[in-house]
Image (tube, rainbow, N blue to C red):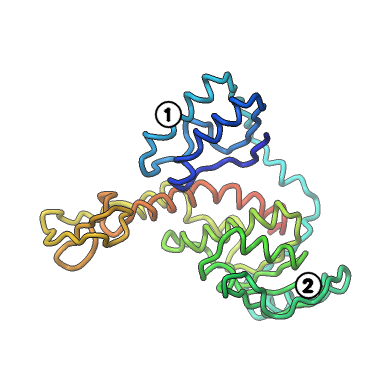
Amino acid sequence: MCLDEMQLTDIADAAILTRLITAILSSGARLVATSNRPPSELYQNGLNRHQYIPQFVRTLESHAVRVHEIDGQTDYRQRSATPPGRFCRAGPSATAQLRAAVDAAGAVRSLADCGSIVDLGGGRTLPLEHTRGGACLVSFAALCESPRGAADYLTLARSFHTVAVRDVPIFSPSQHNEARRFITFCDVWYDAGRTLCISAEGALPELFSAMQDSTMSDAAAWHGADPSAATEVRSQGGSSSGWATTFLGDGSEWSATGRLGVSLAALSGLQEAAFAQRRAASRLREMVGG
């Protein structure tokens, strides 16, 4: 069994991982996996990590699974001489260029026109601004500012071979949810071998410039509030991923992370976005240049 791009960002996945891998290896199957992290560094700072990852590592060792580090200074994605997509700075003229690119791509490689709305299932839809054949134009707001996941982007990939995304921002730490959705979209689009065109507020290296590890850690830092000011504990409240949450006198939450207003889930999201942006930036450069 081959697992490509293994990562852990969710406690449920962490909880079942050891049992899954044990079943695979105990059956006599061979396991090959790739990951941007070694096994001992998966699920970094995750909830109850100490209960799952050490056991997972011991399971690998007991079945003589070897870890090989394959790393180097060369980003081989940058060897593509001519990116298949297109990059331009955001603005009215850029949107016109993207519409023209959609028309050209749809005329050359046509699919049945899916209309201006993609049905994502469950009563949810993705509005498109322009379509022709198998190509479409969508705003970044529609693509990433609403709750979306990999399954939604796979649905889009099944309907279109080319997508143009307009007005991608330079991400700030407060936009880590939007950044993670955009990273997920880039991963899906890259793995599907589809063509991407984008307009963005800055050059590609700038898009994730505020999403580095140190910056994201600062964004999640404790604000220095005094926990002695806590006045009440509400059951089943807040965003600390726990049964009970303590609130301060001003109504703000003192979360289980020990950071004011930063839940365990949000902290994990900040850290994962900081890590994943490097892969996304590399893939973007291969797909659209810039």
How far across and how far down the image is residue 140, in percent? 59, 70
Q: How many marks?
A: 2
User: Is 66 situated left or right of 74 in this image?
Assistant: left
Q: Residue at x 64, y 38 (%)?
A: 3
Mark closer to the chain start, 2 or 1: 1
* Residue 73, picture quadrant: top right
Q: Residue at x 61, y 70 (%)?
A: 121
Q: Mark 2 against mark 1, which lies toward the viewer?
A: 1
Question: The N terminus is located in which quarter?
Answer: top right
How far across and how far down the image is residue 115, in percent? 73, 80
User: Is 4 situated left or right of 177 in this image?
Assistant: right
Q: Is residue 88 above or below residue 30?
A: below
Mark 2 closeness class: few <14, some 14–19, many ≥20 residues within 10 Å: many
Q: Is residue 227 above or below residue 92?
A: above
How far across and how far down the image is residue 23, in percent? 57, 31
How far across and how far down the image is residue 55, in percent? 44, 28
Closer to us: 78 or 107:
107
Identify the residue position indicated by label 1 in the image.
54
On residue 101, the disc is 2
Closer to us: 54 or 181:
54
Closer to us: 45 or 52:
52
Q: Is residue 93 above or below residue 181?
A: below
Q: Please, what is the three-letter code of the amino acid marked with disc 1?
A: Pro
